[in-house]
């Protein structure tokens, strides 16, 4: 039976205040709580630490920015650009990325729980050795994404483009990738044990094993 993730949505209050990203930069701990930020542009910068809690970010761009030790809890990001941003070793819990551009995003060794990526472009993203618990990827483009050595627990891949995606040193046991598409994906045979695939995908994997399918 295929495992279903129990993703918990961000816990936001109805009285979020409007804020400017400069408030984060001016704060000694670079912390923002209970606020909405719209249209911020903070690109190709380095921020040593950052704490976001109960925050909504809309139409913001953080392309190429290095976030060292970022901690996000109960956060929604809509139509944001984090292309080539670095969130290595980030702590990301109850966060929803929607309609975001995440090409080349570095989430290696990140600790994530109850995270949803919805309608996001995540081509060339780096999730090497990331811990993914109760994470849903829905209708996302993950071409050439790298999940090498990632730890999956209750992860869902729904209607995603997995072309050339790397799943070496990980496992898809208990997952369902039958709605996903790919011409070629780097999925070793040991990673497929216990994974649900479509009949067409099964034929493709059989051919990779050298089997002749009649």
Image (spheres, rainbow, N blue to C red):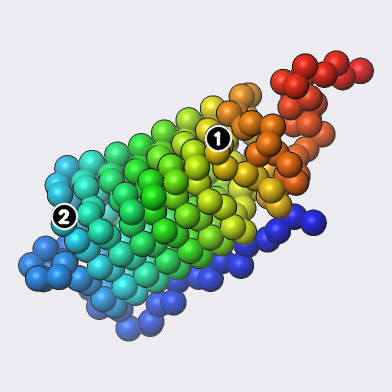
Q: Residues within 10 Å of mark 2 (few under 14, many from 20)?
A: some
The residue depicted at 45 percent of the width and 68 percent of the height is 94
The residue depicted at 59 percent of the width and 57 percent of the height is 153
For residue 1, side relative to residue 110 (left or right): right
Residue 85's x, y, as percent? 28, 44
The residue depicted at 43 percent of the width and 42 percent of the height is 128
The residue depicted at 61 percent of the width and 67 percent of the height is 6
Residue 8's x, y, as percent? 53, 71
For residue 148, side relative to residue 23 (left or right): right
Q: CA distance from mark 2 to mark 1?
A: 31 Å
Residue extending farthest to the right is 214
Q: Is residue 136 visible?
A: no
Q: Which is nearer the eye, 32 or 48?
A: 48
Residue designated by label 2: 47
Q: Which is nearer the eye, 146 or 157?
A: 146
Which of pointers 2 and 1 indicates the residue nearer the eye?
1
Residue 168's mark?
Answer: 1
- The answer to whether 113 is drawn above or below residue 128 in the figure is below
Q: Quadrant of the C terminus?
A: top right
Q: Which is nearer the eye, 39 or 180?
A: 180
Q: Quadrant of the N terminus?
A: bottom right
| Label 2: which secondary element | strand
For the residues bearing labels 2 and 1, Cβ distance under 8 angstroms: no
| Label 1: which secondary element | loop
Residue 75's x, y, as percent? 37, 67
Residue 93's mark?
Answer: none
Residue 107's x, y, as percent? 37, 48
């Amino acid at each position: 039976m295929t495992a279903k993730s129990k993703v918990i949505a961000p816990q936001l209050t109805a009285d979020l205040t409007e804020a400017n990203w400069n408030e984060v930069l001016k704060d000694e701990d670079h912390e923002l709580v209970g606020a909405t930020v719209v249209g911020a542009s903070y690109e190709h910068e380095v921020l040593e630490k950052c704490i976001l809690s109960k925050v909504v970010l809309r139409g913001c761009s953080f392309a190429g920015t290095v976030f060292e030790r970022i901690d996000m809890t109960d956060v929604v990001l809509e139509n944001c650009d984090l292309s080539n941003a670095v969130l290595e070793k980030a702590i990301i819990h109850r966060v929803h990325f929607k309609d975001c551009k995440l090409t080349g995003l570095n989430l290696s060794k990140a600790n994530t729980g109850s995270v949803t990526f919805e309608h996001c472009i995540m081509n060339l993203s780096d999730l090497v050795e990331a811990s993914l618990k109760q994470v849903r990827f829905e209708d996302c483009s993950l071409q050439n994404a790298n999940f090498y050595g990632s730890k999956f627990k209750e992860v869902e891949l729904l209607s995603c483009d997995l072309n050339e995606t790397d799943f070496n040193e990980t496992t898809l046991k208990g997952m369902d990738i039958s709605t996903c598409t790919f011409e070629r994906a780097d999925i070793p045979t040991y990673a497929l044990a216990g994974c649900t695939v479509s009949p067409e995908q099964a034929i493709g994997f059989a051919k990779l094993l050298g089997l002749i399918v009649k």
